[in-house]
Amino acid sequence: MPLPVDARLYALVPAAGSGERMAASLPKQYLTLRGRTVAEHTLSRLLSFAPIEQIVVATSTSDLWWPQLGIAHSKRIRSILGGETRAHSVLNGLMALKESASERDWVLVHDMARPCVRLSDIEMLIRECANEGAILATPISDTVKRADKGSILATVPRQQLWRALTPQLFPIYPLFDALQSALATGAEITDEASAMERAGVQPRLVAGHVDNIKITVPADLPLAAFYLDRQSQEGLS
């Protein structure tokens, strides 16, 4: 189901994390990827998606790099302070959006460390979205093991397992309420869908491309460069 005709679409990018697993001297969103920072690649993709009214970026209070990026001063980008966790940063962003957004408006929440997202996947996400929301995801093709202290306990059936990606698309007000409620109980919220699930919602899974990787460890950076090069050859960037 496409979004309602009178709904406005916003984007929210939590970017207050330190990216410790990259073992770099600066946050991973400011590492260089094909001549630009990861953040510039990601935000350029989102800015090129015309239906997005505004992009809210939630950064850390100690972030000295964000204000130096030209893209940070784009007219369609609003900077706010994030929180101690991703969920808190998203909640802060939603609170900022509620200053101007109505109850009919929706938000795409996207990881800053996913610079390879395809606009065609975002379009598909919006087109196939259910009434209460949807996320991009890919079916798990690997054999999955449950382990304890490095030893296998069991092989997990993978037929119903998916790997969650971003963007994740939800109505702004219900997502705010779900996150606020979950955090108030001390629940561990790893993505927006998990907060909505706790609220009794069953978000739709929309199959995305496997090249929508999240840069997390050093080996991911050259892989992202490879995917961006291939997308460029396909005329996608």
Image (tube, helix red, strand yellow):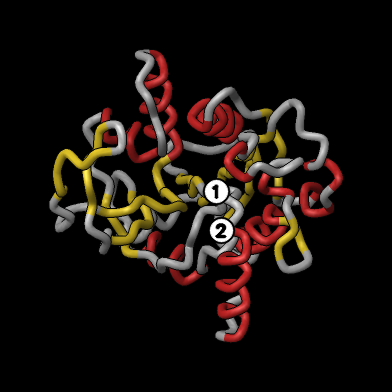
For the C terminus, which image quadrant? Answer: bottom right
Compared with residue 168, is residue 40 higher up or lower down, i.e. above or below? below
Q: Which mark is residue 216?
A: 1
| Image location (x, y in percent) of residue 212 | 48, 62
Q: Quadrant of residue 83?
A: top right
For the N terminus, which image quadrant? Answer: bottom left
Q: Does residue 55 appear to the left or right of 194 in the view shown?
A: right
Mark 2 lies on a secondary structure that is: helix
Q: Does residue 86 appear to the left or right of 154 in the view shown?
A: right
Inspect the image, locate mark 1, and give the three-letter code of the amino acid beneath it.
Thr
| Image location (x, y in percent) of residue 221 | 62, 60
Mark 1 lies on a secondary structure that is: loop
Asked if the residue at tag 1 contacts the one at tag 2, i.e. Cβ–Cβ closer than 8 Å, the answer is yes
Inspect the image, locate mark 2, and give the three-letter code of the amino acid beneath it.
Asp
Compared with residue 110, is residue 139 higher up or lower down, i.e. above or below? below
Residue lying at 60% horizontally and 49% vertically, measured from the top left = 112
Residue lying at 38% horizontally and 57% vertically, measured from the top left = 136
Q: Quadrant of residue 44?
A: bottom right
Q: Which residue is mark 2?
A: 220
| Image location (x, y in percent) of residue 119 | 51, 68
Q: Does residue 58 appear to the left or right of 213 in the view shown?
A: right
In this view, the residue in front, 14 or 215, is 215
Residue lying at 42% horizontally and 49% vertically, measured from the top left = 168
Residue lying at 62% horizontally and 45% vertically, measured from the top left = 22
In this view, the residue in front, 92 or 232, is 232
Q: Quadrant of residue 49?
A: bottom right
| Image location (x, y in percent) of residue 185 | 35, 13
Mark 1 Cα-neighbour bin, 10 Å: few <14, some 14–19, many ≥20:
some
Mark 2 Cα-neighbour bin, 10 Å: few <14, some 14–19, many ≥20:
some
Q: CA distance from mark 2 to mark 1?
A: 6 Å
Q: Does residue 115 appear to the left or right of 7 in the view shown?
A: right
